[in-house]
Image: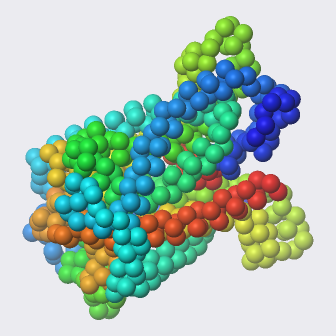
Amino acid sequence: MSDTTGIQAHPSQRDGGGAAAAVPPPSARDRSRKPAASQLAAWAFLAPVTIYLLLFYAYPLYRSLDLSLRNYTVRSFVHGHAPFSGLKNYRIDIRDPTFTPALLHTLIFTLVSIAFQFVIGLGLAMFFVQHFKLSATLRALFLVPWLLPLIVSASTWSWMLNSDSGVVNSALHRFGFAPVNWLTAPKWALVSVIIANIWIGIPFNLVLMYSGLQAISPDIYEAAALDGANGWQRFWRVTFPLLRPVTAVTLLLGLVYTLKVFDIIWIMTRGGPAGASTTFATWSYQLSFGNLLPAFGPGAAVANMLIVMTLIFGFVYFRIQRKQLES
Amino acid sequence: MSQRKTWLKTGIGLVLTGLMLFPVYWMVNVSFTRDRDIRKSPPNWFPVPGTLEGYRAVLHQQEPYIATSVVVGFGTVALTLLLAAPAGYSLARLRPRGGGALSFVLLIAQMIPGIIMAMGFYAIFLNLRVLNTLPGLIVADSTLAVPFGVLIFTAFMSGIPESLLQAARIDGAGYLRSFWSIVLPVSRNSIVTVSLFAFLWAWSDFIFANTLDGGGRHLPITLGIYHYIGNNNQQWSAIMATAVVASIPATVLIVVAQRYVAAGVTAGAVKD
């Protein structure tokens, strides 16, 4: 980026689609002069966070990459000097019988969670955007599940889904259904953690879609109503197309955040029973911290595969954001 | 809209909110339930006759955990503000060369799964011998909030009118002066938002606590609950009472700072 001319504004320099993107651009004239002293000052203010990022983001990431490329034992983990082993840990993981189920569970967990969170969140947003008495208060209360510590939500759901004394089975019983071993039956464990995760994720989708709906001018609906569009048509022909940008953002961020969910699954089922709810996040933890004999190398390799999946969706998100800014 | 129609909507809204918050109600209900009633079938829908036994257990057993979490929470807030506010000022007002790249790195940093950070921190902390210490946990917890903090501060400080800063410059204020006596006081709302979220995330953190502080002398409340669940499966009223206490910061946030919360969610997600 050439700054020497000092006259032209640099609109492309705003940022990488970052937080400031939504803020009106400052007038170019105020900011076009950039003497060396101000660059020095600018970086002096940025220095702490830059050093912090290097020490506490880049270095831990490097360490976890390094862990995955070496043959660590407990001894060499403490004292260093683990031999370089290339991609051996990754090969161990891929040949592990846990690999395919864990990958499958990760995908199911993520996609099913997001589908339900989004549909419910959108429905609620469309309901709350109508502004009735108490609507603001009730909407705020909907945020509660999202703000609760995950251990609180997870342990509450654990107790609600308890086979013998849980309120869910008690309600099922009242309606004549047989009790379900939610957390202890292999075919239900994944369903259970997905239910809890949907509950936690609804507020996020509600808030984002609500902000998207608010941005749609009521005039458009009036015009559509004058043209004789019914409610269903209004939704599919007017609301939904206009919501597409915020939908893309919500879904992609949802993907990024759901892929890495660990706490809920670990607290509710520990990935069990017999690996029935193991995802990449819990498997990685299990390998590194969950056994008496830790397998740091393979554990870090799983974590790094997870990060690759996350970043793929992350970059799709950035691309879409940038396209939206340009148009 | 007719009067009756809006009341109908309010009614539907109340039902939906009730459904959504049922697990929260259930947590409170169980926390007041007597141990002998806990496994009753069907369960008691109201805590009558109730007991404070669970809360007594919290007071006796969980107090040190709560104190630890408060310390870790405030430590995280302080560290986050110290790092994020100056960075936001620079990115928003001083246009550093390469600032765009740095914002981008911050956005990616937010997406990194906690389990990976935990593993890296574990290896580093082991070598530095800061495993199971509070400063170590504070540093790890701050990684949850610092990128968010910088993004919020940048967005907010970009909106400060330039005339305000120009006036200060004419009066001979340098960068540090402008930052300290103009930008920071005007940015009070964003300071509140960032502090609230930093505290909440540190308070709620489980993964760093469990990996980096699992064997420490001072354990946070999340581990208090976790060990409770692991050790005695029977005392659910005590477990749920602890969960209720652990939910206090989130509740305070909703009641006191509702508008900041919604602003934080949308700013952290839509704008980044």
Horizontal side, residue A326 vs residue A82: left or right: right
**Residue A11 placement: quadrant:** top right
Q: Residue at x 79, y 77 (%)?
A: A233
Query: Taking B164 as reference, is A31 above or below it?
Result: below
Horizontal side, residue B173 vs residue B222: left or right: right
Give A251 or A326, whichever is nearer the viewer.
A326
Residue A310 at x, y = what percent? 52, 66
Residue furthest to the right in view is A227
Q: Is residue B46 visible?
A: no
Q: Is residue A46 visible?
A: yes
Residue A64 at x, y = what percent? 38, 59
Question: In which quadrant is the N terminus of chain B drawn?
Answer: bottom right
Query: Taking B178 as reference, is A224 above or below it?
Result: below
The type of colouring in the image is rainbow
Residue A286 at x, y = what percent? 28, 71
Q: Residue at x 12, y 64 (%)?
A: B231
Give B257 or B144, whichever is nearer the viewer.
B144
Q: How many numbered dots are placed on residues in this image?
A: 0
Q: Residue at x 62, y 25 (%)?
A: A40
Horizontal side, residue B60 vs residue A179: left or right: left
Query: Taking B238 as reference, is B69 above or below it?
Result: above
**Residue A284 placement: quadrant:** bottom left
Q: Residue at x 59, y 67 (%)?
A: A313
Residue A122 at x, y = what percent? 61, 67
